[in-house]
Amino acid sequence: MVYDTTWAGEARSAAGCSGVLLGLLLAIDAGAGTLGVVRAVLWAVLAALLFVVLWPARVSVGPGSLVSRGLLRRTEVRTDRLVSVRWSDGVAQRLVLRDSEGHRAELDPKVLVANPPMWHVLDRDARTSLDRDVLRCGETALRQMAARVDRETARTVFKLSGLR
């Protein structure tokens, strides 16, 4: 099983951002002389909502499966039985995976870019789906993701070796 190595930092950032927001709101309200118990509770609820929104899903990939665990739900997709892989439309770019059993998972492509071993396990299983003629749509999305991971990996290697 391969886990997202960037998850802990993103979780700390979510906690830090919500903590800073709470501190600023309390400090501004106290400075204005309008801080009371009700307002403090409202600010705490607002900070908690920000925390929930920013909390990253913990993604892990193993042979034949991808698991995404959020605060409230867990989704698992059989990656060796994928029927579609596509990019979602919207503000935040997401890779949407759907398997033959009807399960669906969305993940931030940055997770795969930051963790090439995760991508390689997922790519191998997606090729298995393609070889079995289960994957009906998604070859283009897979090629785009592979190119993105390869590009970022090469960029990192060049940067670390001083070649720029």
Image (cartoon, grey):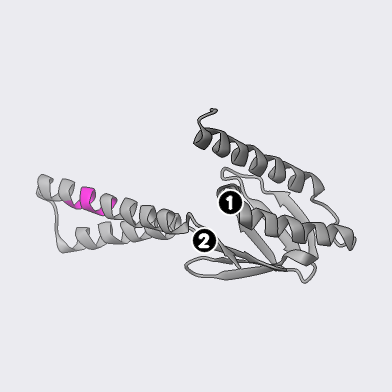
Q: Give whichever of discs 1 and 2 has the lower sequence position.
A: 2
Picture quadrant where residue 69 is located:
bottom right
Give the structural element (helix, strand or loop) at label 2. loop
Which mark is on residue 108?
1
Q: In this view, does 93 lie to the left or right of 79?
A: left
Query: Residue 33 at x, y = what percent?
Result: 9, 49
Q: Which amino acid does label 2 sit on?
A: Ala
Of 60 and 161, nearer the camera is 161
Q: Does the magenta stretch include residue 25?
A: yes
In the rendered view, would you say 114 is above or below 15? above
The main secondary structure of the magenta stretch is helix
Of 8 and 103, nearer the camera is 8
Which mark is on residue 57?
2
Labelled pair 1, 2 in contact (Cβ < 8 Å): yes
The magenta stretch is 21-26
Picture quadrant where residue 47 is located:
bottom left
Residue at left offset 66%, top offset 45%? 89
Other-residue count near label 1 (Cα within 10 Å), few / some / many at <14 / 14–19 / ≥20: some
